[in-house]
Image: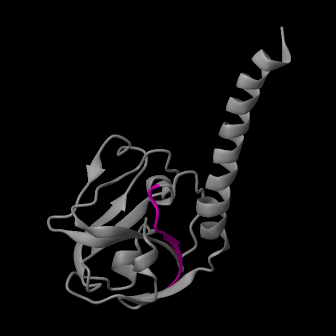
Amino acid sequence: MSKKNSLGPLLIVSGVLLTIAATILLVIIPNLLKPPTTMWIGDGVFRTRIAQNDGARASGLSGVTKLESDQALLMIYPNEAKWGIWMKDMHIPIDIVWLDKNKKIVHIVKNVSPDNSTSKIFEPNTIAKYVVELPAGTVDSKAIITNQLARFAADSEDVQ
């Protein structure tokens, strides 16, 4: 085989590796390096991890085996819609809270267990821009109800 013919596979492999490296540098590492933000919702104050790109939102809390009582995941979407949440690869039960563009609570689903909900998609009754995942029981213990406002700082301009 000549050197000329062996360059094709090498170029393809190099291109794939370059694409993977660019994805890691531009998408994954910036999300890992972002410090958690603080969220005030109901009577609770939460250390909140932000998911603002498709990959981070799709994985959500999948694979997480423990969520402390003061931890939350905030999913920021590029626009308002009826964003659905499912429990694929979840190991812990959660409460799910949907917020509109003004950070007002518009829908709540409590105590979603991964045991019996892996194929069901949970959706709000109305459009939302943000979805918050909290440890199960938090909605009741922290007096979180619809029409309350949540407070947090997040760059929704950086949403992908």
Vertical placement of 111 versus 5: above or below? below
Residue at 23% in and 58% down: 123
Quadrant containing the N terminus is: top right
Residue at 21% in and 61% down: 82
Q: Inspect this view and state whether residue 89 appears.
A: yes
Left/right placement of residue 66 relative to residue 103 reads: right
Which residue is at the far left? 125
Main SS category, magenta section: strand
Left/right placement of residue 7 relative to residue 80 reads: right
Vertical placement of 97 versus 153: above or below? above
Which residue is at the far top? 1
Is residue 71 one of those drawn in magenta? no
Picture quadrant of residue 81: bottom left
Q: Inspect this view and state whether residue 97 appears.
A: no
Point out the stretch of residues depicted in magenta: 46-54
Left/right placement of residue 148 relative to residue 92 reads: left
> How far across and how far down the image is residue 99, in percent?
28, 77
Picture quadrant of residue 37: bottom right
Left/right placement of residue 95 relative to residue 20 reads: left
Out of 1 and 30, give the one closest to the viewer: 1
Picture quadrant of residue 149: bottom left
